Image (spheres, helix red, strand yellow):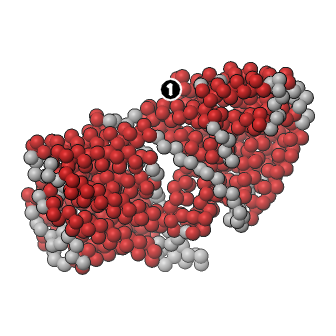
Amino acid sequence: MPVASHTAGQDGFDMGAWLPGFLRSAAFFYALRLALSGSLALYCAYFLQLQNPSSALVTTIIVASPMRGAILSKSLWRFLGTILGCVASIMAVALFVQSPLLYLSAFAVWTGCCSYISNLLRYFRAYSAALAGYTIALIGFGDVLAHPDTIFSVALDRLSVVSLGIVCSALVTMLLQPATSENKLQADSMQSLRDLSELLTMVRDGASEEKILDTRRRLLFRIASYDQAVEFGAAESSEVARRANAFRQLFGLMTSVTASSMRIGERLQALSADPQTAEAAARLRRILSNLIQHIPDNVQELRHLVAASSHMHVELRHFANHTQCLKSLGLVNLLDDAARQLRMMARLADPRVQKIRRVRLPLWRDHVTALRSGLRAFLAAELLGLFWIYTEWPSGGSAIVMTAIIVALAATGDNPSGMMKAFLQGTLIASVLSFVLVYGILVHMDGFPLLLMAYMPIVILCGYMQASGRNPALAMSIMLFYAVLSPIANPIHYNLTGFLNSVFSSIIGALAANIAFMILVPPSFEMSIRLATLSLWRGVSDAARKKMPASNLTWEYPQYQKLMRISARLPPAGPERRRIGRGSAALVLTGREIFKIRHAIEHGIVPVSARPAVQRLLAVLRRQPQRAAEFADHACREVVAAGVHDPQLLRTAASLAELHLLLLEGGRQVSQS
């Protein structure tokens, strides 16, 4: 993640103004912190005479992040994943080391299971599961195979160097990296409200569909990134941890309003184009304008948004009491939802509000994609292991380690294919750099200071690239494999043949990992979109079938995760993105209308004469939501016939009409996917 630039002091005088721009940037200071923590970890590992000092350095590289909370969070989960991997290694050696095939199969099954679990988790929990999977290869595919009695000491050494790297990284972070997550999250909240105000202004003014869709897409992706900021901020700030659920509710509600903004604009334009409803459209546009004017620029003005949204609710109710036009009432429902959500946002974004009701926000877990990832990891480890056994390749263990690392880590990212290419490129570049370092520089040097002078420039350069957003995946892979391939042992042994064998096996392992992704079980964006869409339909069924949640956000939150998955897999622009995006967003919005209809049934708003039609609709939604559109239309007609002069009942009819349109759009999207 790119970091902000370094700025001058408050008095306008910058003591480093004479330095080049990149030396004064926050990205460069991040790279220096990374080099410092790596140097400290390497020195301590040498001082404690640990067998693999480079593993401590690797740990500092892996847990490094421009965000302080991310370092603390990843350090914790790396430690837990290492412990689990060490325990699994000891168990595997104790049970299967006498039978190479069983040992290899146990490793492959364990790696596959961990890869499956990592795909069901998020952020560094996912990394912890992936780490537990390939730690068994790091520990169990070396000298342990020839000397299984050393497994405890090898596992303990692995845990020691990882713990040392974590401690050194955390120490440098706490001393030199300020805690900024709380202020940044608050600023992000206010910025998102301003962006939402801009989007609603475009909707009110009738901007082009392409412009609104592009603005909405950028806002949705920005909001989605804030969830990660909440996760990491909670690791460094008790205040963020206390408000974590409130922040997630806030960003979920922002997603909800953003997703429904297009429909608000379409309803306004349709009403304005009809002479019979043009006056109603103008009045509703004025009501929306008043709300937009009160979306604040700072925390102190949030109370004005609460008052404005409450006033808007009263105005909309008064408007609904004096119209029988379902199209107008449909827009009233959409605007009333937006007003209610903005009122809740104002309370959630205000740090002065202490009592916030917690809302359960479940995560969506894509088990099919996770199973494919687990199968890919299992096949890659098993097939390469069989090749190693039957060819008796001396360096085959190193290739398996490299394959396990790359397959496990790439599967946890949003763009596994891109990460695979970056890992392969990073392995090739790191191989050349490590050869130059060891046999071109270190052979002529002696002492730890000279070692750091020779080694750390590459770390600083790659750290700067990573923090400034210049191909961060490639920069990370170069740093990682540069540390892995450079034989910085205790002491350093210069064995050119062994080094070349290690480099060759690492390249073969990286190639095998790419083959596993391209041939064995290739990732499929089309399948991912189809699975997420079908899951959206199941969500529609759940909204009609399961117990009504205390908050609509409990149902909507996982649906928005599916919507984000679909958006991330679609091309950046074009008719396909517009069609699938609109249909998926329509399915997400169905739950809101279903809950309104169920509420009307449970509270006796729907009269007895119309209740059978509405109940048939809900029954079809529970079993076959794809066929429910015609039932929604029929139920709407029945409700209108039963209560022409009942404003509350007519608003329920408007919800049924909206549900009919939403199901039609969602159905078209599914049928063409």
Residue at (83% x, 26% y) in the render: 608
In depth, the one of 542 and 640 nearer the eye is 542
Judge left or right: residue 495 versus residue 634.
left
Res. 669 image quadrant: top right
Q: Residues within 10 Å of mark 1 (few under 14, many from 20)?
A: few
Instruction: Please identify the residue farthest to the front as the structure is shown.
Output: 95
Judge left or right: residue 79 versus residue 657.
left
Q: Is residue 386 above or below residue 165?
A: above
In depth, the one of 643 and 335 nearer the eye is 643
Residue 317 appears in the picture as rendered: yes
Res. 381 image quadrant: top left
Where is residue 104? Give x, y as percent: 20, 47
Where is residue 190? Give x, y as percent: 66, 58
Identify the element where label 1 is drawn.
loop
Residue at (72% x, 48% y) in the render: 341
Q: Amino acid at mark 1?
A: Ser
Judge left or right: residue 305 versus residue 368.
right
Where is residue 340? Give x, y as percent: 75, 48
Q: Is residue 525 above or below residue 342?
A: above
Where is residue 7? Give x, y as percent: 53, 70
- Residue under pointer 1: 673
Residue 511 appears in the picture as rendered: no
Q: Is residue 602 above or below residue 623?
A: below
Residue at (71% x, 32% y) in the render: 266
Judge left or right: residue 437 versus residue 633.
left
